[in-house]
Structure formats: structure tokens, C-alpha cells
Amino acid sequence: MEVETPQSSQNMQPLLRVEKLVKCYERQNVFGSREKLLALDGVSFAVAQETTLAVVGESGSGKSTLGFCISCLEIPTSGSIWFEGRDIVVLAESERRKLRPQIQLIFQDPSNSLNPRWSVEEILLEPLNLKGKLKREETKQRAVALMTQVGLSSDMFQRSPAQLSGGQRQRLAIARALALEPRVLILDEALSALDCSVQAQIANLLIELQRTLGMTYLFITHDLAMAAHLADEIAVMNRGRVVEQGPAQNILRHPKEEITRHLLAAIPSLDNAERPPLES
Amino acid sequence: MVPILEVQDLHVSYRSSGEASYAALAGVNFHLMPNEILGVLGESGSGKSTLATSLLKLLPSNGNISRGSILFEGKDLLCAPAGELEQIRGKRISLVYQEPSVALHPALRASEQVFQVLAAHESAGKSALRQKTRQVLASLFPKEADRISNSYPHQLSGGQRQRVLIAQAIACGPSLLIADEPTASLDSTTQKEILGVMRTLRDELGLAMIFITHNPALLAGFADRVLVLYGGRVAELGLARTVLSSPKHPYTRALFQSMPQILENTRDTRKTKLPVIAGDSSAAQLPLEGCVFEPRCPDRMEDCREREPAVVNLGESHTVSCFKYGG
């Protein structure tokens, strides 16, 4: 059952490399003066193909902004994002458009990220039609194949998202992301809104897809236990910076930074059942 | 001691258009002692939120309590007239919701939102109520009560908003607090902090609490007893340390096994498949006869399809509904 991460992948050219990424939001407060918020403050890391980098941190640490920048939903203030040997930050929009399908984003709450008025079929056909090269029959076949891949039955084609369970909705969101044959999936708290037993099902699906499709994941979460289970490496973020990064096991067993210890201590665990009650 | 709340044989069903009504709760029994925290553990579709809302008779219009009784401080809430219920809600029993950004009024300052709860229930003068509002907020925000009081919800963090909701809930000095997934939208460090706050309130104010969650790990070291709800029935009920460390019902056991145990293992189990419970707990999947968990159960037997298991007492007030233990 264990999957071996090829040792060579450590030496291989990383698929995705982020260098000194800065994102600064400016907003006007009620008195009209400008406030600056440094959401990302010089973030650098690299992810090898077919591996998972978990980005963990408290709310407000900048993890979601990082995901938005890499998936080109936000334009970073400075720094570079190298993907397939090219810096997507400085790329012309026409060139960036060609790369964008290869990096897909999956959100926390599938009931908000799927169009409630569309059927499952329409949701899946949209990206396939945008790609535009397929015949009608082929498109349909591809949609059926995607459903099977994520463990959904094609009987569900005519249902609306509201008629699916939370787990099924998240599977559909994953199928939609896979439609464009991406190489990187950014999972922004993609398991956090699901029930524990459903989290396990979706986590297994992600492991399966990584094996069969060679998928690379950026797993953004505040759930350190799940991060530890799925990731090869963990990057700990605090106030817009990566304060600690390394192989998952090292981070868990020998945390160096105060914030990492703090996050580790907050992992709720059934093991606490015998421990003294929480102090306030 | 007399229980503060006794729920007996509670049946709640929802009518849906065109279809037959479906039972969200079917024969739920439990009691709650004063000063006790009962953790209610359940997945979506288990009926946990229906339980919270039916205790206060706040079910949506298509919901119906068809059978049972809810005795609160010796009085059956299901028979209480509407006016009396209004006096109980928010004053004697209060509810804390999951999503603090939705539960708070976006255009009122935090202090005003707590003040309005007091004003609705207490007859004291305005200045006395303002004074009390300050006290309540100061107990939840010892360091920065003034700043928080004057803030609007959007100026507060998720954890701070949840504290404001708790302030509203305890303002009138209730004896029972029902919290429906109060920490689900918070990150784990803030979750821990809010659990600490709730525990302190229990100790200081002597509150009894029903804490509803889908995450079993949150109940460890927090709840006194745990009630496991599946398909609208009580699967297992017992002391938290017993249920969490040696669960008996096949559902509870399977649920705990599906959680990543990365820190406990010395062996590297990363990226191995987690044991899952096949299928899901949505209403459409529940069988009409026999044990509700039977289709997903790893230990199913012949009896399981024929009839529903009875409650088996395993001692130390640990009960389980499963034929494995006699049923």
C-alpha cells in the first residue's frame, strides 16, 4: 500500500518554484487614508512533480493569498512563480492563458464553488467545451470518464449540486478541475468543510489521483494532522512568511519554530481523552 | 441530583414536497445533569442540528415533532405555550450557532448586539443593562473589552466574533447552552481557545452544555459524556473517556479509524489509504427497516436487516444500540 516517493524527485527540476513572492493589498480606511496589508512577505519554495507540499498556518497567515497568486487569480506585487521553466508573473496574458489550465484550484466549500442552477453534466462540460477541441460525442465520453475517475456514477448527470452530498460535491469539484488535465492542483482547505469519514474518502481519492495521474498538490490547510498524512513536505506560514519548511516527519517530530509548536499543540486528538482537561 | 434536561423518545420528521415525510430523529433518549457537558457527535444527515433546533422548538415550518417529550427543569417544553417558550429561549436556554459571521448583525456594534438580548428579557433600566452588557463582554474579553464593544462584526476576527456570540448566549444567565458546531469555521488554534472559554464558563457559571460537532477529536478532554448520533438514532452514549478511547458501536469505531493518526504512529504511514466507511450518511442511503447503519456496517449480521437493535447497557452508564452486544 505504501507509495515510495522516488528519491530522484528530490534532485529533479521542480515543477513549480516560487521566489520571493510579495503580495501587498492596499485599502482605504473609513477616514480616507491608505492602509497597507502585506499578505505575502517574500515567500520562496519549490515543489517537485508528483509530490505534495502542505502549506499550514493560522487564519490570516497568507496561505490562501499564496494559492490565489499561483493560480493567477491575483497578481503578485513582486517576485516570481516559475512553472515549466517560465515565470508566469511576467508572462503576457495571451501566454499565461495557455498555462493557466495546468494549475487548478479547489476551494473549501463546494456548495459555493459550483453553480447551483447547473446540472452536474453542465458543470463538467463547461471546461471541456472551453478547451474546444473535442467533438460532442467525445466531450460526453470524457465527462463520463471524469466522473468514474473521482468515484461518481454517471447516473448523477442530471442532478443539481444541491441534490448531492457534501462529499459528492467535492468529488465533482475535483472532476471539474481534472477536466483540463492540470499538472498542479491547489487544494485550499478542500477537506476542512467535510465530515471526518468523508474527509478520509476524499483524502484517499487524492492519493489515488497522485499515483495514477502523477498529480502535484499544493495542500493549503490549518489541519496539521491531515497535512502530515498527505504531504511530502510541509511549509509553515506565519504573517505572510514561510517560517519553517522541510520533510513532513521532521516538521512534526522536531519543530523548530514557536508557531509550529503552537500549531502542533492545537491539533485535536482522540489521544487527549485521558489527558487532563483543557486549561483556559 | 435531578437532571436539568430529559429528552424522551423524541421523534422529529420533515415533510418534503410531493414525497412522504422523512424522519430526522427517531426515538432519541438522553438526559443532561446540571454543570455537565454533553458532546453530540454526528455527521451531516445524522440529525444533530435537528436535535438542537427541536430542543428550542425552532424547527423550520416543514418540521414536526411527532412524538416524545422534552423536560427542561421539570417542565415539558413541547406543551409550553408560545409566550412561555419565548421567555425560556435566550434566557434559560440559549443557542450558539456555527457561523458567527451570519449569526451577528453586520451593522450593529458588538455591545449593542449583547444589549439587545438583555433588553428583550430583563426589565431593569437602560443604564443597568448597559452596565451588565459591559460586564458580560469584559468576562469574555478581559484585555480589550472596550475596543471589541465598539467594533462592528467585520472588524473582528472569527474567534472574536464567536466570543461575541457566546457573550450574547450567556448574557441572561441561562442554565443550558446549546452550541451547534460553534468552532467548525475556525482554525485549530482558535478552536482550542474557544473550547477553553466554554469550559471556563461551565466551571464559573455552572452551565450545562450540549456541544454538537462532527469532529470527535474536539470532544476529547472537553466533554463529560458523548452521545453518538447516526441516522437520527442514538448509536452510543457514555462517558467521554470510555466512548472516545474504547468505542463499542461499529459506526463509532469505523469513524475513529478513518482519522489520520500520523502523530501516534512511529511507522511512516503517510500517503497510505485511510480506512473509510463506504457510502455516506445522507437520508437517501438509510434503510427503511432494520438497523440504520447496516448497509455500511463492517460487522453486519442477519438480525440487522430484520429489526432495529435495542439499547444495551454495558455498565458505567455506557449504552450502545447494536446486536453485537445483545441488542
Image (cartoon, coloured by chain):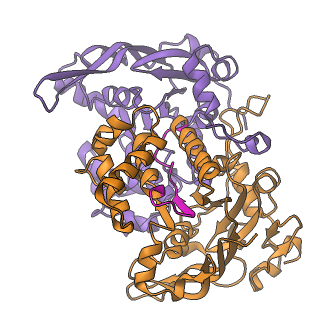
- Relative to B183, say whether A3 is above or below: above
Side (left or right) of A269 relative to A65: right
Q: Quadrant of the N terminus of chain A?
A: top right
Q: Quadrant of the C terminus of chain A?
A: top right
Side (left or right) of A166 relative to A75: right
Residue A169, position as x, y percentages in the image = 44, 56
Residue A146 visible in the shown view:
no
- Relative to A276, say whether B252 is above or below: below
In the rendered picture, chain A carries what hue?
purple
In the rendered picture, chain B carries what hue?
orange
Residue B316, position as x, y percentages in the image = 87, 64
Whether residue B171 appears in magenta in the rendering, the answer is: yes
In the image shown, does B318 or A252 lie closer to the viewer? Answer: B318
Residue A92, position as x, y percentages in the image = 17, 20
- Predominant SS along the magenta part: loop
Q: Which residues are magenta?
A: B170-188
Q: Report which quarter residue A275 is drawn in.
A: top right
